[in-house]
Image (cartoon, rainbow, N blue to C red):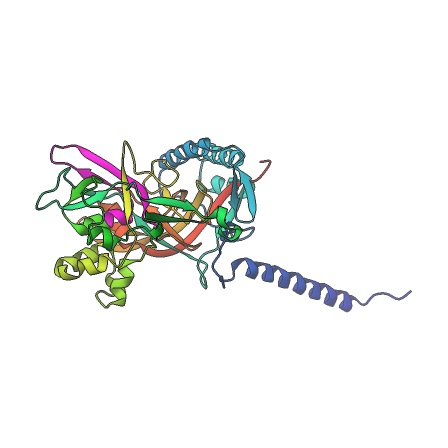
Amino acid sequence: MEKSDPDISQKIAHVLLIIIFFIFIVGLWACYRPLEEAPQVPEQALIPIKYFYPEFNDDMDFGSLATAIERNFQYLDRLDPEHVFFYGPHKFTCRQVRESQEAFLELILGIRGSEELNREIKENFNVYRAAGRVGNRSILFTGYFEPIYEARLTPDKVFKYPIYTLPGDLIKIDLSPFSERFQGQSITARIEGNKVLPYYSRKQIETGKALEGRNLEIAWLKDSVDVAFLHIQGSGRLNLPDGNRITVGYLASNGRPYHSIGRYMIDKGYMGNEGMSMQGIRDFFRKHPEVIEEVLNHNPSYVFFRTLDNGPLGNIRVPLTAGRSIALDSGLFPKGALCFISSEKPVIEHNGEIVGWAAFSRFTVNQDTGGAIKGAGRADIFWGNDKYAELAAGHMQHEGDLYVLMKKPGR
């Protein structure tokens, strides 16, 4: 009987190891390669991961996270328990999502350290990574905040720029009954005679006074730029001269696409990338008031507001939590999802100036959306309503990563 050549056995084993390693690398490359096309459906927006987990560290107190999750339960409790959410290629019911977040809340309230937290998440939760942007799997993080402005309930020579509530002639038309290819699509319009027309643009409303005299004004501000930024932020607080305060929040839009005024100003040569921020735009307008109307009217989108008892509210109609609530594309990411993000935040000196940017990571909840937040590579962090929030929201345009957590079935 012939004996096998040990050299041959070793060579076979070596070849098998190379093949296994190659398969492993190809699998990782398939999961982490840059996107060639933007995700169009929820199944493409989140990718399950099995290797290279992030380090789950949180730079905030868990009390604020508990608040955000408990507010999230208000949203989940309004839904049918069997309502289905898409977490990338996987489907979960509302009941499962709530149970997952209950388990996570119990975990953070009883956790004894970062090492235990990371171990528990890896053992008991599925982790999904956001697909990111085309050609770059990272997420572009921006920020928003709740501004506070002086306002009046009646106009005068100073306070003459209105914010409006929803007009009665604005209608939203569901296109689904017309064709299968229009499933889930709608348009915002108005009826004029026997014609269905797009609703008035910002220019028609602000410059053309299309809504004047219809008693739709909630209040008047003293600066058209304040009105425009209130539209972008989606909510704010209005201080009245008698000491009272009105909280207003997003109710609806005119259905027109959002066009970035910052991008327009760069393209026109008014500002460069290095100076682009909310504060930089304000400074430019103070020096060049003659271009304010031109720049603001570049964005045809217009927001209508409502007064709130508390707020601000996100698109799932629960109060936002500073630093914990984020806005994602609601057509791609599951509403109310528990998320984990990492990016950079501003470092502020005692004089109120940004002196640098520091890496941070934290758990957040997807509780909002926005006209500029489109695609699987965009996220907006709600920073709150203080000075730090204004600076962070005005300057943040940093890359990072976004993950979504969901408890493993049966755990």
Which quadrant of the structure image shows residue 172? top left
Visible residue check, residue 87: yes
Looking at the rendering, in which quadrant would you find the N terminus?
Answer: bottom right
Q: Quadrant of residue 362?
A: top left
307 in relation to 404, above or below: above
Q: Nearer the viewer, residue 189 or 217?
A: 189
Image point 15% across, 49% down: which residue?
223
Residue 392 lies within the magenta run: no
Along the line of sight, which residue is nearer the eye, 156 or 375?
156
Where is residue 242? Give x, y as percent: 11, 32
Q: Tell me if residue 359 can be seen.
A: no
Residue at the spot x=83%, y=65% of the render?
4
Which sits in the foreground, 281 or 309? 309
- Placement of 54 over or under 325, stated as above or below: below
Assign the C terminus to one quadrant of the image.
Answer: top right
What count of labels does the image hold? 0
Quarter location, residue 139: bottom left
- Looking at the image, the residue that sits furthest to the right is 1
Name the side, left or right, on which 10 lies relative to 390: right
- Span of residues in magenta: 229-255
Question: As drawn, which residue projects farthest toward the front?
Answer: 194
